[in-house]
Amino acid sequence: MSERDVEKTYTVEEFAAKLRRLADALEAGKPFRIQIAGERFTVPRNAQFSVEHERGEDEEEVEFQLKWSLADSDEDAEDDDAV
């Protein structure tokens, strides 16, 4: 799989919908399928979650990060119940 680093901007409604689907998957203990900038992938149920806060001279940023190994993603990608 090739390396990828993209950032996609969403409307408030689109972002809220993605967060709701993610929260539902987390609460149900299921993997989460998402498409970003044309590529669809699965975040496995055992992904690690972190929140990052950055402050610069002129702006601040909060990032919600989900991190997992590719082996974990392959296992959950076969799960038919993914959200």
Image (cartoon, rainbow, N blue to C red):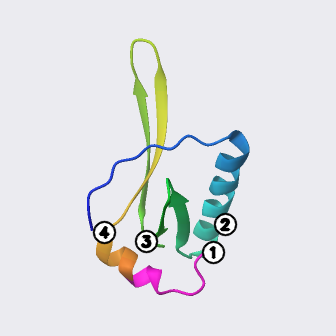
Name the amino acid, label 4: Ser
Q: Secondary structure at mark 1?
A: helix
From mark 2 to mark 1, how far is it between C-alphas? Answer: 6 Å
Q: CA distance from mark 4 to mark 3?
A: 10 Å
Where does label 3 land, which residue?
Answer: 46
The residue at the point 39 percent across, 74 percent down is 73
Read off the magenta span. Answer: 75-83
Q: CA distance from mark 3 to mark 2?
A: 14 Å
Please state if 2 lies on the left or on the right of 41 as rendered: left
Distance from disc 2 to disc 4, alpha carbons, whole Å, reads 22 Å
Q: Is residue 41 above or below residue 37?
A: below
Per the image, label 3 sits on a secondary structure element best described as loop
Q: Which residue is mark 2?
A: 24
Find residue 20 and report its horizontal and vertical position in percent. 68, 57
Q: Nearer the viewer, residue 12 or 38?
A: 38
Badge 2 marks a residue whose secondary structure is helix
Query: The N terminus appears in which quarter of the rendering?
Result: bottom left
**Residue shown at 46%/87% (left/top)?**
78
